[in-house]
Amino acid sequence: MNIEKYREIKRTLPASVRLIAVSKFKPASDIQLLYDEGQRLFGENKAQEMKAKHEVLPQDIEWHFIGTLQTNKIKYIAPYVAMIHSIDRAELLWEVNRHAEKNGRVIPCLLQFHIAQEESKHGFYLEECEEMLRNPEFPTLQNVRICGVMGMGTFTEDMEQVRQEFHHLHDIFIHLKDNYFQNNPDFKELSMGMTDDYPIAVEEGSTFVRIGSAIFGARDYSKPVNDL
Ligand SMILES: *Cc1c(COP(=O)(O)O)cnc(C)c1O
């Protein structure tokens, strides 16, 4: 846990950019420490882990879901999740809408795009996404609110490449805004930037950065979270 680094990030981010502290694999006690520093937005990538943390931590935390979401796990987050950043297929959006309705909520969502070189990163391609947005059933989804787009850059030292990928995501954002969401003031978020590339993401117009290891330290994937 690096509180100094956290303070430095908070101090240097422009006011237009919100920080999501990515706490996946980290114990609830670490989240509580950062909460005591004033942090309220936390990001998790596993539904059951988010649920367990939500149950033991302060209720005014905004939980942002940032990982691949299986439809059978939506139930663990639907009652309280603040935003789902990782809508990467039509089926998922329809299912989130169904669960949100059951819970009497409207769930804010971002459309995740595939912008990296790696095959392993999830997300829509533009054409696929536009097909979904043109589906005559799309306007009937009353319990999801589409607030913008999300993407992950390639894991590489080549920061010029990462910059181009973020620039591309910004172009996608503008294209969707102009063609599908002109009159929708909710469509305004660009979730991009992690520990290694967030300064570039901010230069390219990010409104949410998702930072984990710079704040909490390296993750140990071999051990389960130890205090839940
Ligand atoms: C883990 C993760 C992050 C944070 O990564 P760091 O490099 O630790 O900052 C951000 N976004 C997503 C989608 C992640 O899965």
Image: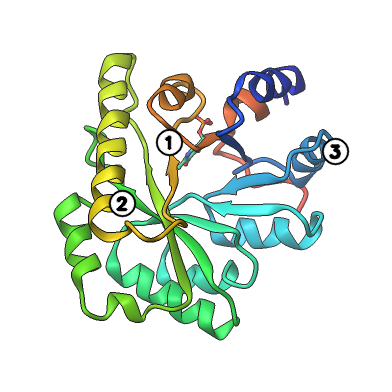
Image point 53% across, 67% down: which residue?
107
Answer above or below: position of 127 versus 199.
below
Could you tell me residue 16's position as x and y percent? Answer: 56, 34
Please state which of the two labelled residues, at mark 2 or mark 1, is closer to the viewer.
2
Q: Which residue is mark 2?
A: 177
Q: Which residue is mark 1?
A: 192
Going by the image, does 181 lie left or right of 202? left
Snapshot quadrant of residue 3: top right
> Which amino acid lies under the numbered mark 2 shown in the image of this protein?
Lys
Per the rendering, the mark at residue 28 is none
199 or 212: nearer the eye?
199
> Which amino acid lies under the numbered mark 3 shown in the image of this protein?
Asp
Q: Residue furthest front?
A: 183
User: Regarding mark 3 in the picture, which secondary structure is present there?
Assistant: helix
Q: Which residue is mark 3?
A: 36
Kindly tell me whether mark 3's CB lies below 8 Å from ligand 1: no
Measured in 3D between alpha carbons, the distance from the residue under mark 3 to the one under mark 1, in whole angstroms, is 26 Å
Mark 2 or mark 1: whose residue is earlier in sequence: 2
Going by the image, does 54 lie left or right of 98? right
